[in-house]
């Protein structure tokens, strides 16, 4: 096979499979979210009864936390790339905490909506589309938190090293995706839809 | 006078054999427009098939490997930009022509303005029967639609408003026009203008559950006189024949009246078909069986005899009660 | 490798019993992460369900052979056509095509396995369990009485028929859950194929030197990512409606039945391209080899495939011309559908041009591929007929549509699958399939196919709708239905011959060698079957047909390719 003389291009470099795989997963997940967003947008104002989006309070603090966690995870990626493992550990923990805050804040928001405003998934069309879309996103945040905590555990056990920087970057892509989805969901639900 | 009307009405309902529900025998403008369009499309696609298919047949015979000849590989041709361009441009042109023709007919049929002389009928799809309401005439009937013939000198198109009481259905009578769906909470509209009187067959064309296959349609296109006679009869209250009063009592005291309406009686149910003029129909159960006393009896005893899964329950009447009810229903002309 | 166990002198154990060896062998298949074994698992799984769904089709055809027949009850019939469609799409079409991709793509690009072998195994088992869940529905519910609770709402499961109110049993639930589960498997495989193709090609194999099979599988996998996921989303919404009191498709609460249709067909239309593009992939390999010529217009074929994938995302509402969209909406989808015919037509012309001037050997793979070209041409043309919205208002939901899509699914896709099996079986097993049985299989299946599906166009034009468990005797459809059913039996017989060929040739077929067809892509450079590691040395390539270059050192492809 290699008896055939080769071409000029000696630089045979292909993208990393982890990165390609994660991008592909993100594309697929984006399609799922798109369908839920389309349903939400199409159904705005079409509930025939029950609470309307006016009862929503804009979750500014939650949003700030979640979006900041993208910055902290970026700083973590940077740290591990340069071998600064302690710094990496701290930024990683910060990311986790911000993510946890987001989930806690969402839980508080939902508690109010359910028990004070009487809005649940089954109340009306708005309830259905709201909880489905925001809930789908929250589920993805939780999955991300599980991943974050696993890596945190490995870090605390001293098992994460500089040579894992690329894998950390691939995982971070997922976390950035979750944040990007929140930008869309936030805009559609709390800005446009209200 | 009643007798004459009765004769006239009877002649209207005298069964001429229905024509086959083929898209190739249109009797109404939308169906005819569609058939003409289809001829044009067939011409184009048929030509493409003849040319490309012919080339393929030629290639199969001309270039098959023959014995010793197959020692050497044939000349390797990797492509040709000119050829590729040619067989890209030509299909694009064909698509342009096809699309413009198609668009014209879409707009002609869908956006045709409704004339004053149009008859309005509201069609409500149910599992597994058709409800027909004539709002301006105050008539409610089921499963067999009567509409007037529409001629050039006397245009009388029928505009159907399509609603559904439960799941998706579709109104399809191929000789009268394309089908349009009946979707709950999504009113639709279509129009037909049959120019030849007769009986035209169709059926529900969107799977709607277990007895979708037996949700049949009969459309009677009547001459103006026949239609007027039919309307006059339908506007009357239910026949009140005292000789079958026993049957009427059974009807009103049993669960029948929960689902069915017979005008002039206490029965005002709307879950099932209006039975006021049941005997003016040739079939029962949306075409599942001919309208005869025996079939009526069997149907009332257990609808599963004709239509397993129909939403009407077996009525659990005694034989005597059943006979009385059938006798009563048989007077409802 | 655990296929040879040497007895250790002095040990108490002698050579393992045949039972233990068998269990060992079985276990190796269950835990494998080898793309070749997983590919075979997918294909065998799909072939099994091909037979099952084929039986369902025969039940349908027996019931419809005469008017007002009572072969099966309406409940059973509605389950039959729902399961036939659902099985063929999700448990036959997708698995077998991804199975071929799994087996062949790493070999064709000179890699040793897929990018994520464990994800590969996980994806297969998810698909497999989804299928088992779907079929469990026959014995779930009422048990063996009354055919259980198999899905009976059509494979398109329109709302609100699927709402709890109108489908109180578990039929719809099995449909949604089984497909959600197998959908995750499909997603995993698609990700795997993309990562493999982009990240694991051997040296010298630029994207434009890959075999067209790999190109098409790349396009298919990308399309799958954004096609299956809308279905998963819609099915989650359906389950929320059915079990959590949601109102997505609750028309009384402001929800919309039409929204379900949009979501389903946003999945459903590109899905048929996910099914047909691998058929093109197969034809792109078989036709050149048996015409003894390079594929005509490789770059155009790549562009056309990518073009088809993109345009296919814009045509979905041609399944909804009758639901009451505006005239402008109908016109748009008519146009987009006609446009997707253009790149598709280009591919047909390129195949013709490949065969033109060739020296065509009509071995069984080529018989199937040649029939495929003719049948796909017809299918494409009836598709154009259906794209003409006003004509669609007559033909929608009639047997004309069923004839059209079976022309694509059977006439194009199944024919190419048969071609692929006859072509690559020697590579996978090391044995040739019988040419004699292959020809019997081909001609019988070809004749049966045309008897059934050519006639079926007419019965649709004559007004017969689909999804009906019986029809009236006075509508003029009786004789045609009988003929259609007879054709179905003939196809069934042909498939039995095929299954016999598969089994008998495995035991007694001629030895195949590395390259029985004198082909040109990398998979033919390995022994048959290939060793676990695929290639002894990582290949290095310089053109689209590395083996042609080796066989014709004076006239290599890289001198001519642009």
Image (spheres, coloured by chain):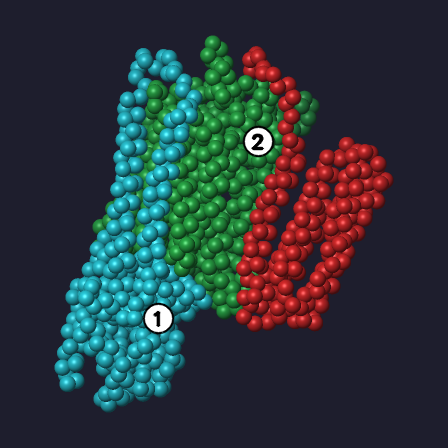
Chain colours: A red, B cyan, C green
Horizontal side of residue B17 vs A151, given as left or right: left
- The residue lying at 54 percent from left, 18 percent from top is C542
* Location of mark 2 (residue): C197
- The residue lying at 70 percent from left, 45 percent from top is A176
Depth check: B155 or B164 in front? B155
**Image location of residue C292, percent across then percent down:** 39, 20
Specify the subunit that label 2 lies on: C
Question: 10 Å neighbourhood of mark 1: few (<14), some, or many (≥20)?
Answer: some
Residue C78 visible within the image: no
**Image location of residue C106, percent across then percent down:** 56, 28
Determine whether C458 is above or below B230 in the image: above
The C terminus of chain B sits in image quarter: bottom left
Residue C460 visible within the image: yes
Q: Which disc, if any, is residue C268?
A: none
Specify the subunit that label 1 lies on: B
- The residue lying at 68 percent from left, 44 percent from top is A174
Determine whether C178 is above or below B81 in the image: below
Horizontal side of residue C486 vs A148, given as left or right: left
Observer-side mark, 1 or 2, equals 1
**Image location of residue C232, percent across then percent down:** 54, 51
Depth check: A85 or C208 in front? C208
* Location of mark 1 (residue): B122
The answer to which image quadrant residue B192 occupies is bottom left
Q: Secondary structure at mark 1?
A: strand
The N terminus of chain B sits in image quarter: bottom left
| Residue that sits furthest to the bottom in the current view | B242
Depth check: B81 or C523 in front? B81
Q: Secondary structure at mark 2?
A: helix
The answer to which image quadrant residue C356 occupies is top left
**Image location of residue C493, percent across then percent down:** 32, 39
């Amino acid at each position: 096979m290699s008896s055939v003389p080769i071409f000029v291009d000696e630089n045979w470099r292909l993208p990393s499979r982890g990165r390609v795989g994660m991008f592909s997963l993100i594309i697929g997940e984006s399609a799922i979210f798109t369908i839920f967003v389309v349903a939400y947008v199409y159904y705005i104002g079409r509930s025939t009864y029950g609470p309307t989006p006016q009862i929503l309070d804009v979750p500014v603090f939650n949003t700030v936390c979640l979006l900041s966690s993208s910055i902290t995870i970026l700083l973590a990626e940077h740290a591990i790339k340069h071998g600064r493992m302690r710094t990496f550990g701290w930024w990683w923990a910060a990311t986790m905490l911000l993510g946890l805050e987001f989930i806690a804040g969402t839980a508080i928001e939902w508690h109010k909506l359910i028990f004070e405003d009487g809005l649940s998934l089954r109340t009306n069309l708005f309830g259905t589309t709201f909880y489905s879309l925001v809930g789908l996103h929250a589920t993805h945040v939780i999955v991300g938190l599980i991943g974050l905590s696993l890596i945190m555990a490995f870090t605390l056990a001293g098992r994460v090293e500089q040579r894992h920087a690329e894998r950390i970057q691939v995982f971070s892509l997922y976390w950035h995706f979750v944040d990007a989805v929140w930008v869309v969901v936030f805009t559609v639900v709390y800005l446009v839809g209200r | 006078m009643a007798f004459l009307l009765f004769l006239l009405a009877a002649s209207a309902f005298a069964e001429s054999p229905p024509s086959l529900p083929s898209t190739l025998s249109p009797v109404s403008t939308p169906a005819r427009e569609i058939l003409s369009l289809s001829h044009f499309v067939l011409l184009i696609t048929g030509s493409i098939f003849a040319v490309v298919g012919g080339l393929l047949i030629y290639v199969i015979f001309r270039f098959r490997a023959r014995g010793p000849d197959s020692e050497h590989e044939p000349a390797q041709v990797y492509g040709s930009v000119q050829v590729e361009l040619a067989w890209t441009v030509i299909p694009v042109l064909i698509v342009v022509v096809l699309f413009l023709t198609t668009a014209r007919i879409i707009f002609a049929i869908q956006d045709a303005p409704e004339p004053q002389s149009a008859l309005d009928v509201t069609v409500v799809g149910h599992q597994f029967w058709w409800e027909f309401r004539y709002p301006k005439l105050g008539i409610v009937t089921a499963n067999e639609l009567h509409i007037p013939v529409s001629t050039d000198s006397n245009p009388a198109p029928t505009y159907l408003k399509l609603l559904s009481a439960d799941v998706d259905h579709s109104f399809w009578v191929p000789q009268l026009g394309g089908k349009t769906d009946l979707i709950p909470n999504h009113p639709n509209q279509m129009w037909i203008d049959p120019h030849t009187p007769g009986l035209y067959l169709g059926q529900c064309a969107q799977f709607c559950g277990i007895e979708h296959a037996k949700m049949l349609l009969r459309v009677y296109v009547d001459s103006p006189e026949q239609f007027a006679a039919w309307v006059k009869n339908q506007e009357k209250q239910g026949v009140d024949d005292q000789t079958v009063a026993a049957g009427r009592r059974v009807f009103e005291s049993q669960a029948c009246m929960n689902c069915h309406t017979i005008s002039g009686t206490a029965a005002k149910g709307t879950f099932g078909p209006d039975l006021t003029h049941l005997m003016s129909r040739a079939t029962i159960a949306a075409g599942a069986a001919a309208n005869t006393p025996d079939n009526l009896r069997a149907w009332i005893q257990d609808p599963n005899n004709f239509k397993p899964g129909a939403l009407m329950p077996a009525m659990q009447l005694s034989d005597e009660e059943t006979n009385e009810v059938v006798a009563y229903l048989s007077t409802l002309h | 490798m655990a296929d040879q166990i040497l007895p250790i002198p002095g040990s108490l154990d002698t050579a393992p019993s045949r039972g233990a060896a068998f269990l060992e062998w079985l276990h190796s298949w269950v835990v494998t992460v080898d793309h070749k074994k997983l590919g075979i698992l997918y294909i065998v799984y799909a072939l099994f369900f091909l037979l099952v769904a084929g039986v369902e089709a025969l039940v349908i055809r027996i019931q419809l052979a005469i008017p007002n027949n009572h072969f099966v009850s309406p409940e059973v019939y509605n389950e039959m056509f729902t399961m036939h469609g659902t099985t063929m799409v999700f448990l036959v079409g997708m698995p077998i095509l991804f199975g071929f991709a799994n087996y062949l793509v790493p070999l064709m690009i000179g890699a040793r396995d897929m990018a994520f072998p464990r994800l590969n195994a996980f994806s297969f088992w998810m698909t497999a369990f989804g299928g088992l869940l779907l079929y469990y529905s026959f014995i779930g519910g009422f048990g063996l009485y009354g055919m259980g609770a198999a899905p009976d709402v059509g494979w398109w499961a329109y709302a609100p028929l699927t709402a709890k109110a109108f489908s109180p049993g578990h039929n719809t639930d099995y449909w949604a859950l089984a497909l959600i589960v197998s959908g995750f498997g499909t997603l995993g495989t698609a990700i795997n194929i993309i990562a493999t193709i982009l990240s694991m090609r051997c040296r010298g194999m630029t994207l434009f030197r890959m075999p067209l099979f790999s190109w098409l599988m790349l396009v298919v996998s990308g399309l799958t990512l954004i096609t299956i996921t809308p279905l998963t989303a819609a099915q989650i919404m359906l389950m929320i409606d059915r079990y959590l009191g949601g109102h997505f498709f609750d028309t009384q609460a402001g929800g919309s039945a039409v929204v379900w249709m949009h979501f389903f067909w946003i999945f459903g239309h590109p899905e048929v391209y996910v099914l047909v593009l691998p058929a093109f992939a197969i034809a792109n390999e078989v036709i050149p080899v048996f015409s003894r010529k390079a594929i005509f217009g490789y770059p155009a074929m790549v562009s056309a495939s990518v073009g088809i994938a993109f345009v296919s995302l814009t045509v979905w509402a041609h399944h909804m011309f009758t639901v009451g969209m505006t005239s402008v909406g109908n016109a748009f989808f008519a146009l987009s559908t006609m446009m997707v015919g253009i790149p598709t037509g280009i591919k047909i012309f390129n195949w013709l041009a490949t065969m033109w001037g060739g020296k065509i050997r009509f071995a069984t793979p080529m018989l199937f591929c040649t029939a495929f070209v003719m049948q796909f041409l017809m299918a494409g043309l009836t598709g154009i007929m259906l794209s003409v919205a006003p004509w669609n208002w007559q033909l929608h939901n009639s047997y004309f549509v069923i004839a059209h899509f079976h022309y694509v699914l059977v006439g194009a896709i199944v024919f190419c699958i048969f071609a692929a099996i006859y072509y690559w079986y020697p590579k996978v097993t090391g044995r040739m399939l019988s040419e004699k049985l292959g020809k019997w299989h081909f001609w019988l299946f070809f004749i049966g196919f045309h008897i059934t599906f050519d006639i079926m166009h007419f019965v649709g034009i004559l007004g017969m709708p689909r999804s009906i468990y019986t029809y009236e005797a006075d509508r003029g459809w009786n004789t045609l239905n009988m003929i259609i059913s007879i054709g179905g039996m003939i196809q069934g017989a042909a498939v039995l011959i095929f299954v016999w060929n598969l089994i008998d040739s495995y035991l007694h077929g001629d030895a195949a060698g590395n390259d029985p067809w004198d082909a040109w892509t990398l998979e033919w450079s390995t022994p048959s079957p290939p060793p676990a590691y695929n290639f002894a040395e990582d290949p290095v390539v310089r053109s689209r047909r590395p083996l042609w270059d080796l066989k014709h050192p004076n006239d290599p492809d890289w001198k001519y390719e642009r």
